[in-house]
Amino acid sequence: MFKLLYITLLTMMISPTWAAVIMIGDNDGYGAGIADNANHPPFAPIYDGRTPDEVAATNGAQYTDSYSTAHPGYSPQTGTTTTFSFTGLGNGWTSGSMWFDMADFQASTFGAVTTTYNGIAQNWSFNDGYPSTVVRYFDLAPDVLTSINSLGYLDVVIERNGSADFYGFDYALLSDNYAADTDPYNDPTIGVNVPEPATISMLFLGLALLLIKRSKA
């Protein structure tokens, strides 16, 4: 029995348990109760549906629930760059996906934004049209996973790059699973930082040693 418990704990130590999803912003329908993938009512720039906490945020929540986003003259934010920063991710990532609830992207008409994940270019030439909201997800490529494991964080940077597009975000969400294995709305760990793998490993190692000691007593 002790040997079985030891093997189980060792397996968990090698494959740390991660928080399932981390959401920046909230799934409140752009601060207006808009259902996922539904058309939104006409937003007249400058629209600002953020909560006080979102306005004061520095992780990217300040770029949610607004229209148009990071769009000088038409936006509650300054500048032309939107950054979602997921920190404290550790170095045990073998899979992952990014999710966004986004509105009104029309790259062919107004120009495409440039988007990077930890500096790695992504194709964001979306043509969803007005007034469309879309929940979109992407499995993270191996080079992005490698960068997360190297840096311990993921920065999603969306730069207008001269685009005149009017767009917005309800939230950005990072999962440690591929999209097919992720439930973005029903996981109790939404908003909880991912634990450091070293901390988990030390915990399980201590439990394993305790079990071994008791088995020899």
Image: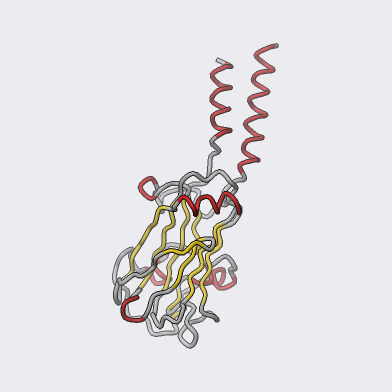
**Residue 86, above or below 78:** above
Q: Residue at x 48, y 70 (%)?
A: 158
Closest to the observer, 113 or 188: 113
Question: From what the image shows, is residue 15 above or below residue 148?
Answer: above
Residue at (40%, 83%) from the top-left corner?
Answer: 164
The quarter of the image holding the N terminus is: top right
**Is residue 38 left or right of 91 when viewed as pictured?**
left
Q: Does residue 132 appear left or right of residue 173 in this picture?
A: left
Instruction: Name the quadrant of the C terminus.
Output: top right
**Residue 187, image x, y percentages:** 44, 48
Which residue of the protein is positioned furthest toward the bottom in this rendering?
A: 73
* Residue farthest along the top direction in this orientation: 217
In the image, 124 versus 65, the foreground residue is 124
Residue 174 spot, x, y in % from top left:
48, 55
Q: Is 60 rendered above or below residue 7?
A: below
> Is residue 90 shown left or right of residue 123?
right
Question: Where is residue 193 shown, x and y percent of the image?
Answer: 57, 52
Number of numbered discs on residues = 0
Q: What is the basis of the colouring in this image? A: secondary structure
Q: Residue at x 31, y 77 (%)?
A: 108
| Res. 37 image quadrant | bottom left
